[in-house]
Image (cartoon, grey):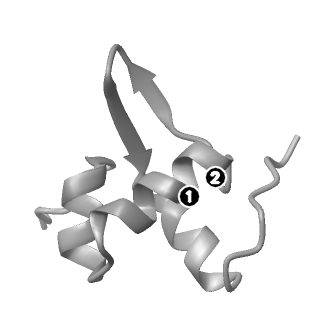
Amino acid sequence: METDTKTIMTIRQAAREYGFPEYAIRTLTKRGAFPVIQVGKRCYIVRQVFEDYLQKGGERYNAKL
């Protein structure tokens, strides 16, 4: 069974899918609330990391080592 969910998303895609303003997600990424993938000027969010961040109520993301 194939799903249409992508592993990484742009800030715009995350905002649309999760119902947040783009500026709010952009501010969170600039503050380092969760890790992102930066490619040039583009910023990509890993879906699972963002969902974990939301489930923890906005607690700063700590990578499991």
Rendering coords of residue 55 (x, y %):
61, 83
Q: Place residue 54 in its image quadrant.
A: bottom right
Rendering coords of residue 37 (x, y %):
47, 30
In this view of the protein, which residue sits in the foreground, 43 or 27? 27
Instruction: Identify which amino acid the numbered label 1 is placed on.
Output: Leu
Q: Secondary structure at mark 1?
A: helix
Instruction: Please rate how many residues cluster around mark 1, counting C-alpha atoms within 10 Å: few if below 14, some from 14 to 19, many from 20.
Output: some
Q: Does 63 sit above or below residue 37?
A: below
For the residues marked 1 and 2, what is the alpha-carbon distance in whole angstroms? 7 Å
Q: Residue at x 42, y 53 (%)?
A: 26
Q: Nearer the viewer, mark 1 or mark 2?
A: 1
Circle 1 is placed at which residue position? 28
Left or right, 56 with respect to 35, comes to right
Whether label 1 touches label 2, CB < 8 Å: yes
Circle 2 is placed at which residue position? 34
Left or right, 20 with respect to 60, comes to left
